[in-house]
Image (tube, helix red, strand yellow):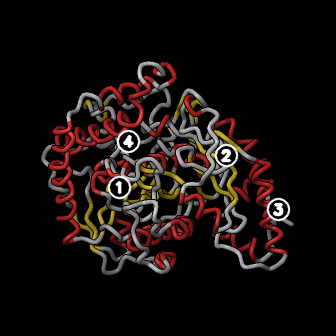
Amino acid sequence: MTNLTHEELGYMSATELAAKIREKKLSPVEVTHMFLERIEEVNPKIGAFCTVVPELALKDARQAEIAIMREEKVGPLHGVPIGIKDLTPTKGIKTTYGSRLFSDNVTNKDAVAVSRIKSAGAIVLGKTNTPEFGHKSITDNALFGRTKNPWNTQRISGGSSGGSAASVAAGLVPFAEGTDGGGSIRIPASACGVYGLKPTFGRIPKSDPINAFSDLNPFLHHGTLSRTVEDAALLYSVMVGPDPSDPFSLPNTSENIQLAVHNPNLKGLRIAYSSNFGYYEIDTQVQSVMENAVKVFESLGGVVERVNPQIDNAEEWIYKPFACLFSCRMAAAYSALLPEKEELFDPTFVKIIRMGLTYSAMDYKAVEIARSKVWHAFQTIFKDYDLLIAPTLALPPFSIELPSPPEINGKMINPAQGWALTSHLNLTGHPAASIPAGFSTDGLPIGMQIIGRRFDEWNILRASAAFEEASPWANYRPTL
């Protein structure tokens, strides 16, 4: 039904694919076949997908094609391929959490987000790679190995949704699902040159059958990774809304969020610009890209002013509180497996568990005071501004051989959190996107965060679409 090459199809937007399938210009079976062939060809070079399910995907594609031929009513993602992060339970498909402990785990129930994606008609091609239990900001594990950056396979893809971001950047799927507990959507989106959206906490239900309250500390979000803002709005629109399994899921207050991207202008928007939040060390190439981005926003009618959140001690307000919350979360879930199963864990994950065991209940509760300071610092900005823009990463993607950059501009940084300007927004739950803003001198993507008030995904998507229209990035593709 089509003369498209694998690359032409691979880089077609999800929105266009869905339209062509509904119009019978593309066959869901043929589309699925071609994406599976592209995965077979390209994935060994980057390790974005860790599990591929061709038989199941083609079975679903055949059902999708029957529905189209019968002219049945179909969902907005009907026949469009997608990747699901390997932290997200997916019925009938191996979900390992990047851990040897779960190397053969097949779940019997979909996460709410996956159930909604399937109900909208998407074809799940498989699971995308993640570090063990999503515990770090680079993507590798002992089960599947590394996920490499499609722009340069010697550089990191970011994490923990590195497989999802790399699969989208490489044209293996038009979009993918991800999760963000400390920057895990935004970090790989920046590193891989794609658009990553972390909605307000609670917008997309995050269901845990054992501990329904586990995603509060820090806030853990489902979200989207795509090549276009329009595709992010499309995928987000089918996942959003309350579910009784999640006590913190929110009502969907926007009837059609996709309309936000059809009005891409910044007129009347007041935008705060922070080059480093007042405490990060930022690489000069990232600074240059951000200064150019500010000029784009101003040319589009946005009123941009330089503002920093009033955070006078990042170590005490952000780094230590986040480390406490995250390590305690992991210790509560997995410390009972030590030392018996310790050899099966990533050594860095074991360190995180052991760190979590050192905190007292009083230490844990005291974090709420620091967290409140961060919350109020950002709320103060949003009293006067509609949006806040800032870098996503403090430097371009670094060597895949490094666990973290040792320094920036010759200055030592916090190795866990000092190079990603993201974790504080998992303390507060504000919505944020990472948008491709430019490239380094050696052709590596550099991302910019667009942060909004709680519940204001509309203005984030609106501003993102305006920037995308003025500085389009979707036609820039890595050479694989």
The mark nearer the N terminus, 3 or 1, is: 3
Of badges 4 and 2, the one in the foreground is 2
In space, the residues marked 3 and 4 are separated at their CA atoms by: 45 Å
Please tell me whether mark 4 sits on a helix, a strand or a loop: loop
Q: Which residue is mark 3?
A: 62
Q: Nearer the viewer, mark 3 or mark 4?
A: 3
The residue at which mark 2 appears reads as 93
Q: Position of residue 371 (x, y in %)?
A: 20, 50
Vertical side of 319 occupied by 458: above or below: below
Residue 31: x %, y % from top left: 78, 60
In the rendered structure, which amino acid carries the disc numbered 2?
Ile
Is residue 83 in sight in this rendering? Answer: yes
At label 4, the amino acid type is: Leu
**Mark whose residue sits in front, 3 or 1:** 3
Answer with mark 1 or mark 4, whichever residue precedes in sequence. 1
Left or right for 27, reference 425: right
Q: CA distance from mark 3 to mark 1?
A: 46 Å
Contact check, label 1 and label 4, Cβ < 8 Å: no
Q: Amino acid at mark 3?
A: Arg
Marks 1 and 2, the one that precedes in the sequence? 2
The residue identified by callout 4 is 395
